Structure formats: structure tokens, C-alpha cells
């Protein structure tokens, strides 16, 4: 589901115009974004929690050049799924995903597209 599909569902469920539903969805996303930017913790019972996690600066490695790179500290939004949502998703564990969300099958991979060097193994 993308944003426009969410807007359409809100409009249908609440019997409002798509324009009004778009305003509602935009306001919800804006409120969530502002709260996270301020470092607030957001909890939606049955759905999950959003929080901001602080990561310290560290030295990483550029995988192409193997050169050391300083990675600055950062704050990253994090989502933890709620119990009811997790149970609802797991209730459908035996059912296939929608066609556009299936993970690629090994047979879908073209070996020529992979950047593998057998000497690195």
C-alpha cells in the first residue's frame, strides 16, 4: 500500500472526500514526523511504537576502496511492532505475499549481475 492507496481507504472508510482524507493523512504524518524530530516517543496501542535511537560516531570502511571513513553520530527513527499487529501478520504466515512484495527467488538472480570475485572467498 502506498500513500495514495491509504488516502483512498480512509476516504472510503470515513465517507469523506479524497481531498479531506488527504489532509487527514498528511496531518497524521506531519504530527508523527514533528514528534520524532523533537525526540518524542510515539505509542499506538495495538500497532507499535516509534522512537528515535541515537548512534555514536564510529569508523567504518568503504567496501569499494577499503578506505577508513569517519561516520558521524546520528539519530535514526526506529519502529517496534505491537503485539496485535505482530499476531495479525503471523496469523497469515502460511499465505503467500502479494506478487509485488515477494522476495526474489534464487532462480531470479542473474549471476552476471553479481559482483563476486572467487579469489576473495
Image (cartoon, grey):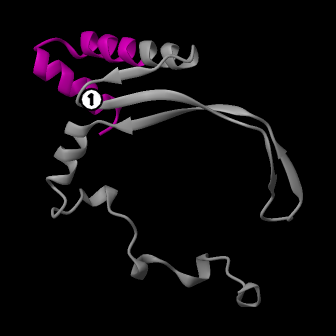
**Residue placed furthest toward the bottom:** 119
* Residue 20 in the image, given as x and y percentages of width and height: 26, 9
Q: Is residue 97 above or below residue 72?
A: below
* Residue 65 in the image, given as x and y percentages of width and height: 86, 64
* Magenta region, residue range: 1-29
Q: Is residue 67 above or below residue 15?
A: below
In the visual, does 33 lie left or right of 66?
Answer: left
Identified at 60% across, 82% down, the residue is 112
Q: Quadrant of the C terminus?
A: bottom right
Q: What residue would you read off at disc 1?
A: 6
Question: Is residue 23 rendered magenta in the image?
Answer: yes
* Residue 105 in the image, given as x and y percentages of width and height: 38, 75
In the visual, does 84 lie left or right of 32?
Answer: left
Q: Quadrant of the N terminus?
A: top left
In the visual, does 21 lie left or right of 121?
Answer: left
Identified at 76% across, 90% down, the residue is 119
Question: Is residue 22 rendered magenta in the image?
Answer: yes
Magenta stretch, overall SS: helix
Q: Quadrant of residue 85?
A: top left
Q: Check disc 1: other Cα within 10 Å, few if <14, some if 14-19, many if 20+.
A: some
In the visual, does 102 lie left or right of 37?
Answer: left
44 and 29: which is toward the camera: 44
Q: Is residue 60 above or below residue 85?
A: below
Identified at 33% across, 11% down, the residue is 23
Identified at 39% across, 37% down, the residue is 80
Question: Secondary structure under badge 1?
Answer: helix
Q: Quadrant of residue 10?
A: top left
State the count of labels.
Answer: 1
* Residue 16 in the image, given as x and y percentages of width and height: 15, 11
Amino acid at each position: 500500500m502506498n500513500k495514495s492507496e491509504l488516502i483512498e481507504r480512509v476516504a472510503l472508510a470515513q465517507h469523506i472526500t479524497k481531498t479531506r482524507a488527504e489532509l487527514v493523512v498528511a496531518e497524521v504524518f506531519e504530527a508523527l514526523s514533528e514528534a520524532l524530530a523533537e525526540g518524542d516517543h510515539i505509542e499506538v496501542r495495538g500497532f507499535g511504537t516509534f522512537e528515535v535511537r541515537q548512534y555514536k560516531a564510529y569508523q567504518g570502511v568503504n567496501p569499494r576502496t577499503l578506505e577508513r571513513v569517519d561516520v558521524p553520530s546520528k539519530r535514526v527513527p526506529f519502529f517496534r511492532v505491537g503485539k496485535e499487529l505482530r499476531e495479525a501478520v503471523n496469523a497469515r504466515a502460511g499465505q503467500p505475499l502479494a506478487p509485488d512484495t515477494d522476495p526474489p527467488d534464487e532462480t531470479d538472480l542473474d549471476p552476471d549481475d553479481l559482483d563476486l570475485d572467487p579469489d576473495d572467498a
